[in-house]
Amino acid sequence: MHHLLPLLAALPLLGAALLVVTGRHLPRAAAETTGLVFSGGTAALALVLTLNSSPPMVEWVGGWLPVDGESVGIVVVGDGPALGMAALVSLLTVAALAYSWRYFAEPPPGHPGAFTALMLVFQGAMCGFALAGDLFNAFVFFELMSVVAYALTGYRIDEARAVQGALTFGVVNSLGAYAMLMGIGLLYARTGELAMTKIGRGLDTAAAGHGGPDGLVLASFVLVLTGLLVKAAAVPFHFWLPDAHAVAPTPVCMLLSGVMVELGVYGVWRVYGTVFAGPGGIPAADLTRALVTLGTVTAAVGAVMCWYQRHIKRLLAYSTVAHTGLFLVALGVLTPEGDDGIALYVVGHAGVKAALFACAGILLDRYGSVDEHELHGRARELPGVAVMFAVGAVGLAGLPPFGTALGKGVAEEAVGGPLTVVYVAASAITAGAVLRITARVFLGLGPRPRDARSDLETSGTGERPETSGPLRRIPDTMRTVPAVLLAAAFAVGVVPAFGGLVARSVNEAGSGGAHASVRWTAHGILLGLASTALAAALAALAVTRPRWVAAPGWAVPLRRLQSGHVGDYVAWLLMGVTVLGALALPGVLGG
Amino acid sequence: MQILPYLVAAYVFLVGCYGLATSRNLIHTVGCLSVCQAATYVLLLAVGYRDGATAPVFSDVEPGSRPVVDPVVQALTLTDVVVGATVTALLLALVLQVAKRHGTVDPDELRELRG
């Protein structure tokens, strides 16, 4: 079975190569069917492998097996979380491809396979990153998925905003990736190894000589984490995300927000657990301090900025920032329950967020705009989409029994205490903003909001529809995909065996044999209901009394920070590196 | 152990970052990103260096007869160069499109995405 592991990265790449070669001669339907077959085949393989991932599988690619414990081969690790991420990536790619089925406009004309081929490369790169067992291949797949993501973000090259967003995305993410490579180089210098488990052991052996981690370990930790946190869009590395997500084509947004950002969080979990968790690595208290601090700030900034957006895709992008913050907080407490909660939360969030982006894409297709103010009341004619948007909003808030609610409940119990407030507030504010959109755009409730501070914000007007020509009716695929995604997010919380399965495989891979059980608790259900009620109240207040929740003066500097200037974002990235180093420093000094 | 190559790597990386943060031209920005990447080449090659060692090419050197530098980091650097070429090419293509659509390559004048 383990021989099949590399196929998860190879199959989509093969499909992409096939499409690039033959796409020119194929009719559009044939090219897209080929894409769906390869993507779906990979998804099926990933699911089968995930169900057989206990005990974890290891494959040395090309038969370069270790000799006397030394190896120069490429190692691929197929444990529960890795294969689970690969399955999630593949299923969401299938959904995005189905969503773009025949509807999506295709610049370069006469080359129908190009978009599908890029999506397949994206899928292959993300699967490869999830499975990589050594740091250098993790870097290569990380860069591959980044580069494809830049190309996909700027896919509509005749759109001014799209190319600007893609360029910002490209510069910031590549800089993060190079920082990560510097860190990998330092780790190789210390240990002479690239496989993650062997680096971890090497650090422990080296530290045994002089008692504890030193400056080099700290530097490599900070540099590697910088790359991953840029991808995960943690504050202050997050500035690229809203700019990129607001301009990317809708099917691409579904993948960017649904899984790519989460892969950054997954990378942090994988790298800390395998490389830095030992006595020669970074002490647990320091990681907790760093991740909980950054995560809390990320959740707060993401939620506040989300609330003040009028560009619907940008609003959803900030909601992703807020949720990544929540993931990082629960990851930072380093308990098996926290890991389980995050795994479930990521799966549920992927379904809900992708469905919301899909609904925003329908608005863009119908009206050529994703602006809350301009669309006020205009989408009354789309009751089905309105229901899906509202269901997505309560899913985002964590209304039981959605998968997000189960994951959030488990994570809330793991973090405990005052951090629970962060969870309730961030999910309620982001969901409240989405509910506000539902009420204004789909129901036409409340007065039409006035345009204010247009120097501060990005409006969603004047966006070009992504469809080739006006469609007479919404294609069935565009309606079905969000419905299926929402149903899947619902099923994650309802199917009783699923939570247990996820928890078992996460714990087997990551928490040193400690097993936590995952189940609905009264505490989790009550907090889920509380955030949903709070979200509904916020949305109602925004619609009926817009003045009460209008942007206060103190939010203006925060919004000015998002300047759209790539130099500013690089400066923030450097500051983030410093902060990360300062947060992780005490343990190294003490050691 | 020589500390100088590591200092050079750190310096090159930071100089690249300074250029990125203060750039007034997007082509210059992409160039600065390549400078940052050059720091990774310096670091990787410095990690693999050994005094008195030769290149790890065994066509004219008997294996084991004399020390060679670490070939792994050289393979990493080569891969890194390939990655860098892809990124630079794609970003320059995007800069070209920015110039066409916005009529400027000065990041100070690109103010469509904000807030």
Image (cartoon, coloured by chain):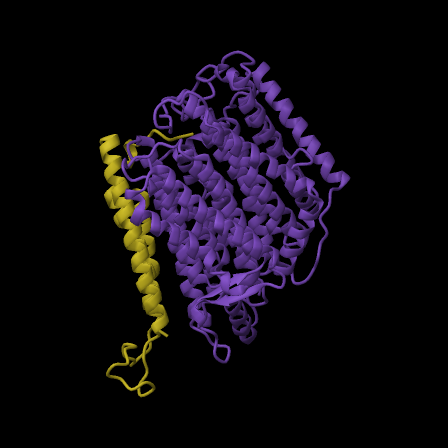
- Residue A269 location in percent, x, y? 56, 54
Q: Residue at x 56, y 36 (%)?
A: A485
Q: Quadrant of residue A323?
A: top right
**Front-lying residue, B62 or B40:** B62
Q: Quadrant of the C terminus of chain A?
A: bottom right
Do we see residue A264 in this rendering?
no
Q: With respect to residue A152, does A176 lie above or below?
A: below
Residue B72 on image: x %, y % = 37, 71
Q: Name the image quarter holding residue A431.
A: top right
Counting labels gives: 0
Compared with A357, A133 (above or below) is below
The chain painted purple is A
Relative depth, front residue between A496 and A425? A496
Q: Position of residue A398 (x, y in %)?
A: 64, 35
In which quadrant is the N terminus of chain A drawn? bottom right
Report if residue A333 is visible in the image. Answer: yes
In this view, the residue farthest toward the top is A447
Residue A211 appears left or right of A147: right
User: Compared with residue A429, is residue A121 higher up or lower down, i.e. above or below?
Assistant: below
Nearest the camera: A150 or A308?
A150
Q: Nearer the viewer, residue A159 or A239?
A: A159
Please give the name of the residue rendered at 63% of the width and 51% of the height, measured from the top-left corner.
Answer: A339
Chain shown yellow: that is B
Question: Relative to A233, does residue A103 appear above or below in the rendering?
Answer: above
Q: Position of residue A397 (x, y in %)?
A: 62, 33
Q: Give the residue at the far right of this rendering.
A: A522
Query: Which residue lies at the image location 77% right of the left edge and 39% below the top edge?
Result: A522
Using residue A262 as the reference point, say whether residue A574 is left or right of it.
left
